[in-house]
């Protein structure tokens, strides 16, 4: 068997999961939550992760939903990514989050992998990292002391690390409904379709009196945490759109990156140049789609 | 050794009840415990798609799941494609034969199950939709063109007809 031995628990409610996690923590047992397993299973099989206990959330049936309330879309953590991909609500009301979902892995991965798992795993190349920043999403976690709502900019701490505590469970992610007239774009570059991206960009903006406003530019895959690029956003804000502006914004975005990741897939400098290109293309696409 | 886990599930319409080591992957359970060796194991960490099966109506990689996670599930493997009564091959299997959608055949069970998932959702896919649905499956022999042709033919064969294998797609 490929994974090292572990104890396995499958609680049926969030409360049960939380008290179990707390008990394991008190007993100094190294426990991990198992959601869809699409990131954790490879890590177990390669023995990069060797937890002593796994707490499988698969039997908790109350965390599988997508609905909207007062302009906020709430997605249960155990909702599969293919359910998000197939959601008409998401497609119509939060098309950026929807488009990003379609870029995650392959259909088989999205059928089993969960929305919550992708946020919690915090891979630098995860599409949802950029979406969390671009849409200022909120993450809801439940622990022994009750519920906390964590804004995206406090949720991601580092490479594969979030603010979720050992005895807490991510139960829901929240995104605003996209407001009327917003233009948006999501683009990434992968070596093969479905691979983790080398670099990617999400853009939203509006048009007012012929100028770009409310410009949001978020990048992922280039540093430990996805981030918005304020300098490039400011350059475009209040300016009339055009190829020259988009190219300048791309250069500004690329220049603002602090030591992009170098790994076997690409050098940091190559990633930097991808960001310049992707920001330029995304701005053009978002402007074309804005009302 | 950690406590064994009770497991109840349906595979190709047959009910099974077993006790498994929690770290047993689903593909090893199918192959070693149930002797259903039609599902292949390539990479064992989620990149090749050879182990693709249908779980509760959707294609998943059986190497990226614990057997314990399939408790209560209904699975279909490549063995369940053939019509149990007549022994006839599934239209998707016939299409792969007719269009030479395989050479060594190692990747084929995974492609067949991914194709079943696609055609259930989308009986008449475009070439782009076929590529999107199969982009998680690797084939080192065919160069993929004949696989795409096979899926096109399978779609034509199953248009309007019932797609599911002997025990339904679930
Ligand atoms: C071939 C392949 C390609 C992929 N491509 C991409 C890609 O392009 N983009 C991308 O973003 N991802 C990609 N992935 C990863 C995939 O999206 C995973 O599904 C996802 O990262 C994790 O979701 P999961 O439900 O499978 O979580 P798991 O693998 O079960 O868990 C992942 C981590 O999150 C923690 N966790 C999960 N749920 C919770 C929760 N509710 N509360 C607290 N902690 C939790 C777990 O403890 C674990 O540390 C790919 C995976 C594979 C195998
Ligand atoms: S064996 Fe499961 S994806 Fe390769
Ligand atoms: S037919 Fe040989 S790997 Fe696909």
Image (tube, rainbow, N blue to C red):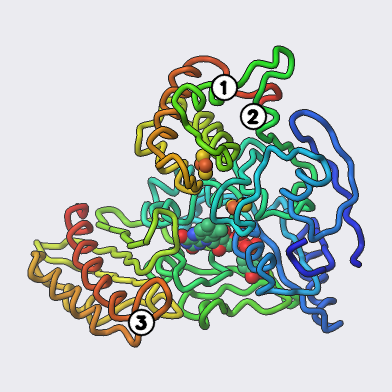
Marks 2,1: beta carbons within 8 A: yes
Ligand 1 picture quarter: bottom right
Tell me the number on the disc at residue A276.
Answer: none
Q: In which quarter of the image is the N terminus of chain B?
A: bottom right
- Would residue A115 be visible to someone looking at this image? no
Name the spot of residue A73 as percent of width and height, x first: 48, 56
- Label 2 packing within 10 angstroms: few (<14), some (14-19), many (20+): many
- Most foreground residue, B138 or A102: B138
Tell me: is circle 2 under 8 Å from ligand 2. no
Q: In which quarter of the image is residue A241?
A: bottom left
Residue shown at 32%/59% (left/top)?
Answer: A186
Label 3 sits on a secondary structure element that is loop
Q: Which callout, 2 or 1, points at the residue further toward the start of the chain?
A: 1
Q: In which quarter of the image is the C terminus of chain B?
A: top right
Mark 1 sits on what residue?
B163
- Up-down: is A22 above or below A108? below
Q: Mark 2 lies on which chain?
A: B
Mark 2 sits on what residue?
B169
Name the spot of residue A267 as percent of width and height, x first: 34, 78
Residue shown at 67%/53% (left/top)?
Answer: B63
- Most foreground residue, A155 or A225: A225
Name the spot of residue A179 as percent of width and height, x first: 32, 57
Q: In which quarter of the image is residue A130?
A: bottom left
Mark 3 sits on what residue?
A260
């Amino acid at each position: 068997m490929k994974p090292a031995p572990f104890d396995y628990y499958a609680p049926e409610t969030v409360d049960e999961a939380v008290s179990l996690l707390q008990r394991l923590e008190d007993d100094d047992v190294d426990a991990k939550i198992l959601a869809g397993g699409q990131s954790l299973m490879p890590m177990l099989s390669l023995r990069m992760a060797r937890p002593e206990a796994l707490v499988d959330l698969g039997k908790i049936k109350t965390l599988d939903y997508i609905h909207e309330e007062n302009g906020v879309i709430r997605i249960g953590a155990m909702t599969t990514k293919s359910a998000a991909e197939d959601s008409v609500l998401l497609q119509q009301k939060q098309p950026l989050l929807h488009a990003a979902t379609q870029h995650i892995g392959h259909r088989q991965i999205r059928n089993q992998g969960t929305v919550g798992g992708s946020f919690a795993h915090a891979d630098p190349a995860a599409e949802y990292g950029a979406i969390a920043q671009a849409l200022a999403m909120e993450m809801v976690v439940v622990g022994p002391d009750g519920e906390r709502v964590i804004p995206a900019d406090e949720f991601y701490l580092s490479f594969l690390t979030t603010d979720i505590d050992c005895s807490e469970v991510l139960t829901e992610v929240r995104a605003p409904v996209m407001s009327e007239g917003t233009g948006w774009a999501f683009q990434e570059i992968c070596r093969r379709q479905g691979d983790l991206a080398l670099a990617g960009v999400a853009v939203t903006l509006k048009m007012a009196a012929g100028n770009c406003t409310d410009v949001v530019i978020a990048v992922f895959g280039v540093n430990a945490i996805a981030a918005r690029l304020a300098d490039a956003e400011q350059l475009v804000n209040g300016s009339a759109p055009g190829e020259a502006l988009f190219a300048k914004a791309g250069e500004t975005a690329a220049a603002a990156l602090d030591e992009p990741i170098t790994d076997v897939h690409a050098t940091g400098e190559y990633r930097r140049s991808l960001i310049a290109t992707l920001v330029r293309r995304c701005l053009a696409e978002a402007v074309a789609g804005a009302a | 050794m950690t406590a064994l886990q009770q497991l109840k599930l349906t595979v190709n319409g047959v009910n099974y009840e077993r006790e498994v080591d929690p770290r047993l992957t689903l593909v090893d359970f199918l192959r070693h415990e149930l002797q259903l060796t039609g599902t292949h194991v390539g990479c064992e960490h989620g990149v090749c798609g050879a182990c693709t099966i249908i779980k509760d109506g959707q294609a998943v990689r059986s190497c990226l799941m614990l057997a314990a996670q399939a408790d209560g599930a209904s699975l279909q493997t490549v063995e369940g494609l053939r019509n149990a009564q007549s022994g006839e091959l599934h239209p998707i299997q016939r299409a792969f034969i007719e269009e030479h959608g395989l050479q060594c055949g190692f990747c084929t069970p995974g492609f067949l199950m991914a194709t079943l998932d696609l055609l259930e959702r989308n009986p008449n896919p475009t070439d782009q939709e076929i590529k999107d649905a199969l982009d998680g499956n690797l084939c080192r022999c065919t160069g993929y063109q004949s696989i795409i042709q096979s899926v096109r033919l399978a779609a034509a064969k199953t248009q309007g007809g019932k797609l599911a294998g002997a025990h339904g797609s679930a």
